[in-house]
Amino acid sequence: MKYSIKANSSSKDNGIINIKQSEIIFGTTSESTNTFANPAELFLGAFSACILKNVERFSDMLNFEYSNAEITVSATRLEKPPRMDDIKYELRIYSQDSKLNIDLLKKNIEKFGTIFNTAKSSCSITGEIKKISE
């Protein structure tokens, strides 16, 4: 499987990533620091999207139902060399389904997530999954 995206930016302006029918604006200037996502935040967003996509995928495979899933991710940026490290996540799954096996879901997310495994190859990742009964 291969992927392709297109991105561009203009001098003194923000950047745009085009993926399929989506357009994502990202900050490249000091003026946009508090307005648009920066590249590090986009990276954590891709990490989050990977996990949430796999919740949906494994809900079918592991035969459980959920109404909502939300994730919070934090990471530390190291200076020399500049890179992301120590990613921490908390995944909350809202479900009343007794078939939801949190340990098995976590194992599958951490074994089969493309972005998860890419990040894991270069930094430490710790996470927790919580089932929230509605």
Image (spheres, grey):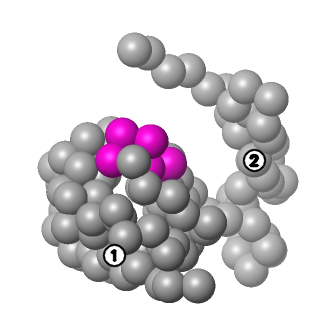
Residue 115 figure quarter: top left
- Left or right position of 129 against 19: left
Query: What residue is shown with label 2?
Result: 24
Q: Quadrant of the N terminus?
A: top left
Amino acid at circle 2: Ile
Q: Residue 18 versus residue 95: which sits nearer the camera?
A: 95
- Gap in Å between the C-alphas at discs 2 and 1? 28 Å
Residue 101 figure quarter: bottom left
Q: Mark 2 or mark 1: which comes first in sequence?
A: 2
Check residue 129 in the rendering and tell me which mark sits there, or answer none. 1
Taken as a whole, is the magenta stretch helix, strand or loop? helix
**Image coords of residue 76 (percent x, y):** 33, 79
Q: Nearer the viewer, mark 2 or mark 1?
A: 1
* Residue for point 62% across, 66% down: 67
Amino acid at circle 1: Ile
User: Which residues fall within the magenta stretch?
Assistant: 55-62
SS category of the residue bearing label 1: strand
Specify whether residue 120 is painted magenta: no
- Left or right position of 115 against 71: left
* Residue for point 50% across, 48% down: 56
SS category of the residue bearing label 2: strand
* Residue for point 51% across, 73% down: 95
**Image coords of residue 87 (percent x, y):** 30, 72
Q: Residues within 10 Å of mark 2 (few under 14, many from 20)?
A: few
Q: Residue 14 versus residue 132: which sits nearer the camera?
A: 132
Q: Quadrant of the C terminus?
A: bottom right
